[in-house]
Amino acid sequence: MAFNPRWKHLKTCALALMMAGLAAPSFAQDTLKFVSWQKDEKGVGDWFENLIDQFEASHPGVTIEFTKVEASAYAPTMTTLFASGSPPDIVHVAAFDYPRFAANGWLEPLDPYIEESGLDLKGWSGQDKCKWEGQTVCIVNLYFGFVMGYNEELLKEAGVSVPTNYAEFRDAAKALTK
């Protein structure tokens, strides 16, 4: 994948907005706690580490303590931390978990920070899912689709073209099913 300078800007904006959710007194702390199940994942964890390095470089005296909680324990751990009143300073919540966090009032509305930063979220895939009661309470960090491979030889043998939509895919699957 070729380098796209826009990605650097988007990453910086994403980090800024991630940090924007921190209350001003939090910056008085020397250490901010950030918990994720993806800390050690190649690519995603590296991306987070890079963002953390950029943030720490631009905020001398502030460090981010990046901790991993296993994926299977993540939602229950975060729920416990939030419910007990001691959540991490920076939170990374899966899209399917965020409605529960929003419903409990655990996520701060980000609209003022988004407006102040000038970040344009129009057209960001999945960003519409981050609205809760009319307010933006999260920013899509990673949004992906599923990738499907196909065997051109099998399709050719069955006399089927490569499908380009769901109906064609369904027909191809039927033609290839023995």
Image: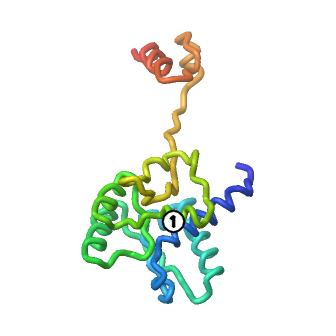
- Can you say whether 157 is above or below 150 in the image? above
What residue is drawn where x is 27% and y is 64%? 76
Residue 110 percent location from the top left of the image: 47, 64
Sort mark 1 into few (<14), some (14-19) or many (20+) by Cα contacts within 10 Å: few
Asked where in the image residue 91 lies, by quadrant, the reply is bottom left
Asked where in the image residue 161 lies, by quadrant, the reply is top right
- Can you say whether 159 is above or below 108 in the image? above
Quarter of the rendering occupied by the C terminus:
top left
What residue is drawn where x is 55% and y is 13%? 160
Asked where in the image residue 103 lies, by quadrant, the reply is bottom left
Q: Nearer the viewer, residue 144 or 115?
A: 115
Scheme of image coloration = rainbow
Q: Nearer the viewer, residue 91 or 2?
A: 91
What residue is drawn where x is 33% and y is 55%? 99
Residue 159 percent location from the top left of the image: 56, 10
Residue 69 percent location from the top left of the image: 37, 69
- Name the amino acid, label 1: Pro
Q: What residue sits right under mark 1 in the picture? A: 112
What residue is drawn where x is 48% and y is 81%? 24
Report the residue that reaches farthest toward the top: 159
Q: Nearer the viewer, residue 104 or 168?
A: 104
Secondary structure, mark 1, is helix
* Circle count: 1
